[in-house]
Amino acid sequence: MKITDHIYLVASGKWGFGITNEIDCNVFLIDTGDGCVLIDSGTGMEPERMDAVIESHGFSVKDIKAVILTHYHGDHACGAARIQKLSGCEIYAPELEAEAIETGDERATSVAGAKGGLYPSDFSYPKADHVAGVRDGEIITVGNLALKAYLCPGHSLQDMVVFGQIDGKNCLFSGDFVFAHGQVLIQSLYDVTLFPYAEAMRRIAKLPVEAIFPGHGVFCLENGISFVQAAVDKFNTGLLPQQLYYFT
Ligand SMILES: [Fe+2]
């Protein structure tokens, strides 16, 4: 699905647009003019479906220069290893989550407890050849694209969002940090932290976000900051923002 001149939605499951495997997060492809960047990678299940979407827009998996993983959960990160093997791309992930992705650590990533539930019982977290750890404030550059990383612990150990200008708009790729209308996804997992989550939301609310591209559900091309601000407003009451509506 072409969204703007250089941004495409190339995977999305049942908590989104239903174009690839049902568990896939939203995967966005950015055409940098010198290769492509993926934001998140999906589960890696039925990968031919994502490949077909990419090819329908005139690109190939081999054109992918970088996969930026917002966090290590399987529905976002498990597709990356296969893409790296096919394209030789770099995989970027939050500094403290990179090793678990590289080694396929199913306990650290909470995939172990979700087998036979969210994931099939024979699902396994693939090992990647190499995953580059991203520090807070680091700028990831590919072709004419520059995205600044913000580490936002809360949804996961060191959840990450990336921000930059594409097609004349200030774009925030928000992963599972914040969704439409300020919804969040707070799961009963060992690495969830609430106060840091609220602090990170207040920090991101200071960015001049126009377009916002969450990891599930709808994206929005105007006034994306209103989604972040809605979450801040709720956190500021001392309560928690609403859960992503698919899971209520
Ligand atoms: Fe997640």
Image (cartoon, helix red, strand yellow):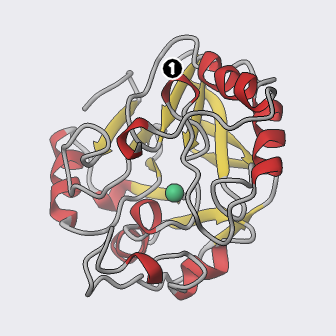
User: Which quadrant: the C terminus?
Assistant: top left
Which secondary structure lies at badge 1? loop
Q: Quadrant of residue 233?
A: top right
User: Which quadrant: the N terminus?
Assistant: top left
Question: Where is residue 148 drawn, in percent x and y?
Answer: 72, 41
Residue 68 visible somewhere in the drawing? no
Q: Residue at x 74, y 67 (%)?
A: 95
Q: Residue at x 69, y 68 (%)?
A: 191
Query: As shown in the figure, which amino acid type bears the numbered disc 1?
Result: Asp
Relative to 201, residue 14 above or below: below
Q: Residue at x 59, y 51 (%)?
A: 186
Residue nearest the viewer, comparing 231 with 206: 231
| Residue that label 1 marks | 167
Dot 1: within a 10 Å radius of its alpha carbon, few (fewer than 14), some, or many (20 or more) residues? few
Q: Quadrant of residue 108?
A: bottom right
Q: Quadrant of residue 63?
A: bottom left
In the picture provided, is 58 more to the left or to the right than 69? left
